[in-house]
Image: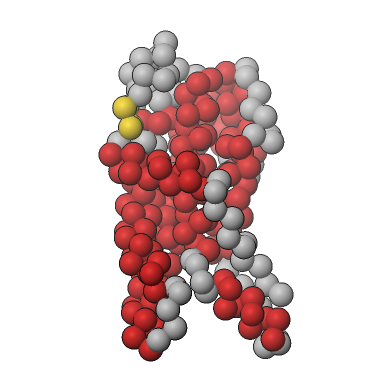
Amino acid sequence: MARLFTNSFTFAEIAVKHFLSGEEAYQKLLPLFSQEDVDAMYQRSLLEMPAEQEFSISICFSAMALEAFIYDYAARNLGDGYVSKYLDKLDLTSKWLVIPRLITGSVIDPGCRAINLLRELVQERNRLVHSKSKAVSFTPEFLEWFAETQSYLPERLSALKGLMAVYHLAALLDGLDGEAHARFSLSIGSCYNADNPADFTMHEDWASIFPLFRSLSKQNPPRRTTK
């Protein structure tokens, strides 16, 4: 049965487009991070805020895409009434653990990489959506920490991990259920061979991001915390 308002494809596309826009600004910023002259600081000021905004949008829409998809997947297989009564109030991570098990009978390891990435994405999304100011003391330690966090854009790492969550969850579900079409529904690409989920064509925007997934494990910038 056809369904309306299945926005997972659109939301995932928005997440990717805004990440790529932020990445373009970030690449221009990289050589400026190590420069302390006035001109470099001015150029940074022109690029940092737009890049941060683009990455923040990407984070939110990655979470929205996963939320939209898992609801649609559940409703297609279990019915809207069942989903509304028993599943819709679960948090996003629980939905991705419970719903595939109900439909496929297969258990997703709650400690697997895809679920851990999802937990991080939800945490970052909540940090943005439920933003709260915090009191700080301008101690030397705080100023040192603040300067360190400004030497990179933590939102970039979070946005990249958010897209990794989308990719890994979609690939995981397609491996469990050949009729899920998760990668197609999340704009990652096309897979028409249910007998061979590896027979897959990736969308060019996702293909341009994929090398960053591979290099992510080599990067270990400090996480944003508050002293």
Judge by depth and name the residue closer to the eye, 160 or 190: 160
Residue at the extreme top of the image, as rendered: 195
Q: In which quarter of the image is the C terminus?
A: bottom right
Residue at figure coordinates x 50%, y 62% from the top left: 155
Q: In which quarter of the image is residue 44?
A: bottom left
Residue at figure coordinates x 36%, y 81% from the top left: 40
Q: Position of residue 47 (x, y in %)?
A: 35, 73
Q: Where is residue 25 in the image (x, y as percent from the top left)?
A: 34, 65
Q: Where is residue 177 in the image (x, y as percent from the top left)?
A: 50, 19
In the image, residue 125 sits, relative to residue 135, either above or below, namely above
Task: Evaluate whether residue 66 shows in this view.
Answer: no
Residue at figure coordinates x 69%, y 36% from the top left: 111
25 horizontally vs 97: left or right: left
Task: Evaluate whether residue 156 shows in this view.
Answer: yes
Residue at figure coordinates x 67%, y 81% from the top left: 142
Q: Where is residue 140 in the image (x, y as percent from the top left)?
A: 69, 86
117 horizontally vs 54: left or right: right
In the image, residue 190 sits, relative to residue 32, either above or below, namely above
